[in-house]
Image (cartoon, rainbow, N blue to C red):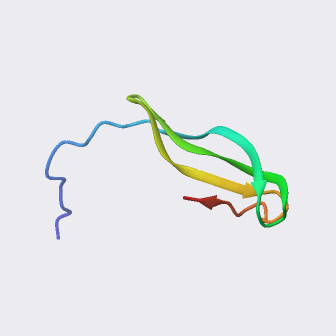
Amino acid sequence: MTPRQPAGPHPADVEVSASAANVVAEWCSTCKAYTLLAGEIVLLTQDGVAHVGYWAWCETCDPPEVSRVG
């Protein structure tokens, strides 16, 4: 059996970096303190910056490996 070949040319390689932007401390309604870190998730590409979501993590309520992403 012969391996399949791609139908057309390969797309150009794209370099993308994910980053957090506008990180601020906010009020956590669960533990009633300013322990919630929140910010935007952005992608940095050759074409510019794209906003892809929002994240939040409370240093008191959430384990270090858990964050709320929306």
The image quadrant that residue 10 belongs to is top left
Q: Residue furthest left?
A: 7
Q: Residue furthest bottom?
A: 1
Q: Is residue 57 left or right of residue 45?
A: right
> x and y percent of residue 6 in the render?
19, 53
Instruction: Establish if 64 lies above or below 51.
Output: below
> x and y percent of residue 59 in the render?
82, 57
> x and y percent of residue 47 in the render?
38, 29
Name the residue: 72% across, 56% down: 57
Instruction: Establish if 35 lies above or below 60.
Output: above
Q: Is residue 49 left or right of residue 30?
A: left
> x and y percent of residue 2 in the render?
17, 65
Name the residue: 76% across, 63% down: 29
Q: Quadrant of the N terminus?
A: bottom left
Name the residue: 62% across, 53% down: 55
Q: 64 or 27, which lies in front?
A: 27
Figure label count: 0
Q: 69 or 65, which lies in front?
A: 69
The image quadrant that residue 15 belongs to is top left
Q: Is residue 45 left or right of residue 25?
A: left
Q: 10 or 20, which lies in front?
A: 20
Q: Is residue 57 left or right of residue 50?
A: right
The image quadrant that residue 70 belongs to is bottom right
